[in-house]
Amino acid sequence: ERVMTQSPATLSVSPGERATLSCRASQSVGSDLAWYQQKPGQAPRLLIYGASTRATGVPARFSGSGSGTEFTLTISSLQSEDFAVYYCQQYNNWPPLTFGGGTKVEIK
Amino acid sequence: QVQLQESGPGLVKPSETLSLTCTVSSGSISSHYWSWIRQPPGKGLEWIGYIYYSGSTNYNPSLESRVTMSIDTSKNQFSLRLTSVTAADTAMYYCAGWGGSTRPFDIWGQGTMVTVSS
């Protein structure tokens, strides 16, 4: 099983600032990595797939990078609607499909 | 735009069977691999398994002994059965659609909360 580890658990950022979230895989997952955003009381929403491709309708301020075992989600200029929990997920080696534990982006 | 809606009991007794159904609307049930994903209160996401319209399934090894998924293409529905539940199975249960490597979990239901308690 590919274990996905996200850091930090909580990130405090001021609106307008850049946020950088990390995701590490226990073994290589190539570029088979997705990022999701989850707001309170809502289902997750797909943001990024293939490590770096934005899903339909996702603003350009969201960008993903990395391959192998190290991945990054960057939000270039945080908007109020971006404060949420973000999960990475690998789909390279499964079952099982596995998610990271999440990073909560909160207002500083 | 395909939409998903979960339904089922919100309360299940310990040792009994959890049963949930997801209805696919405004689209084809053959368009995705249909998964169940759960999220215990305040915790992260756990993939339970998927079923395809052909009936083929793939389960999380950690739950495989207790999980059965089925699909009814005539009703555009797929279902989850989880046996011998305990308090650890208390979670929000989501149904979600996997469209392949270019559309991983691009469709989600709103989720349904299931509590295991006597």
Image (spheres, rainbow, N blue to C red):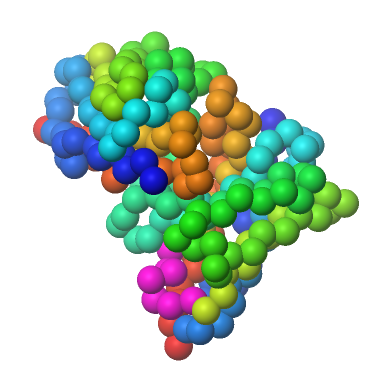
* Residue B65 lies within the magenta run: no
Relative depth, front residue between A103 and A43: A103
Residue A45 in view, yes or no: no
* Residue B88 lies within the magenta run: yes
Determine which quarter of the picture holds residue A32: top left
Percent from the top left, x then y, of residue B111? 53, 54
Percent from the top left, x then y, of residue A100? 32, 41
Relative depth, front residue between A11 and A39: A11
Q: Measuring 34% from the left and 19% from the top, which residue is drawn there?
A: A67
In the depicted structure, whether residue A78 falls above or below residue A3: above
In the depicted structure, whether residue A71 falls above or below residue B11: above
In the depicted structure, whether residue B116 falls above or below residue A98: below
Q: Measuring 56% from the left and 54% from the top, which residue is drawn there?
A: B59
Percent from the top left, x then y, of residue B57? 66, 51
Most distant residue in the top direction: A60
In the depicted structure, whether residue A66 falls above or below residue B3: above
Pick the quarter of the image with the C terminus of chain A.
top left
Magenta span covers which residues? B85-91
Relative depth, front residue between A101 and A39: A101
